Image (cartoon, rainbow, N blue to C red):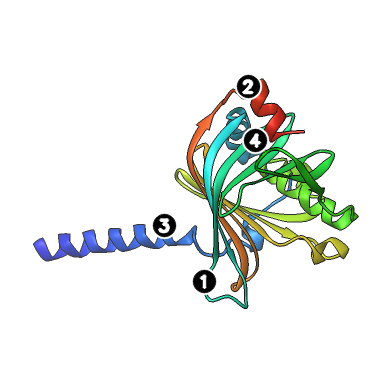
Amino acid sequence: MINRLLLLAFTLTLAALTLRAELPATIIAPDHQLVPGQNDAVWQPLLTALKAKSPIFATFEERRYFAFKKNPVLLTGEIRLDPQRGLSLHYQVPEERILVVDDRGGFMRDGKGKRLHDLPDDPRAQAATRALLSVMRFELATLAQNFSIYAARDGADWRFAFVPLPGPLADVLQPITVTGQDELVNTLEMKKTDTERVFIRIGKTQTNATFNSTELTRFFR
């Protein structure tokens, strides 16, 4: 009897581990494809909850992997997301820079707030910039214009994958994967290959944040 109970416990544990292993595996498969307006109803409560968390302030750690470098380049800083004003990445290490992305495009500032340059005025580059903003806003209908969307969930853990559709934009739009738990984003990854990718881990997050006038001027347009 004891042996049978142990065998049953082992079997149940193995089954649980197998189920947990399904989420980290690739979700880019027909069974996980999400088409806005067709089969996204089950995801609407989560999407509504995620959007309701904005404005958001969080710390982040970004690792940039290059084929010609043995170790990734590490950057750290703060992220601010405002539903109306857009996305602001305040890089603090190794060099202070502020990247602002909104519906009008994107540009870079130095640590003192001086505007350095706009992002390339190339339709494809601008589309890539807007795509990142749409990902952070979870605007699936907008993203579906340029991406195939895949989604999977295992309890509180969830994952979205956005794969560029064939066409000219695919040259500048890399597959984007977003993972999270409950109503918070944990990681973002933009991956061309295993040796060429950007991985961002979101740290401590403050939801429904309030940005004062000084912050709005410095970190947004």
In the image, residue 70 sits, relative to residue 178, either above or below, namely: below
Q: Earlier in the sequence, mark 1 or mark 2?
A: 1
Q: Amino acid at mark 2?
A: Asn
The residue pinned by badge 3 equals 20
Residue at left offset 69%, top offset 27%: 216
The residue pinned by badge 1 equals 71
Across and down, in percent, residue 151 comes to 61, 52
Across and down, in percent, residue 45 comes to 59, 33
Residue at left offset 70%, top offset 38%: 113
Q: Disc 4 and disc 2: Cα gap in Å?
A: 14 Å
Q: Nearer the viewer, residue 135 or 16?
A: 135
Residue at left offset 49%, top offset 57%: 23
Query: Which class describes the residues within 10 Å of circle 1: few (<14), some (14-19), or many (20+)?
Result: few
Q: Amino acid at mark 4?
A: Leu
Residue 185 seen anywhere in this rendered image of the structure: no
The residue pinned by badge 2 equals 212
Q: Disc 4 and disc 1: Cα gap in Å?
A: 29 Å
Across and down, in percent, residue 215 comes to 64, 28
The residue pinned by badge 4 equals 81
User: What is the count of numbered marks?
Assistant: 4
Query: Which class describes the residues within 10 Å of circle 3: few (<14), some (14-19), or many (20+)?
Result: some
Q: Amino acid at mark 1?
A: Asn
Q: In this rendering, which labeled residue sits more in front, label 3 or label 4?
A: 4
Q: Nearer the viewer, residue 149 or 94?
A: 94
Disc 4 vs disc 1: Cβ atoms closer than 8 Å?
no
Q: Amino acid at mark 3?
A: Arg
Disc 1 vs disc 3: Cβ atoms closer than 8 Å?
no
Residue at left offset 67%, top offset 21%: 213
Q: Is residue 118 left or right of residue 133?
A: right
Q: Earlier in the sequence, mark 2 or mark 3?
A: 3
Q: Earlier in the sequence, mark 3 or mark 4?
A: 3
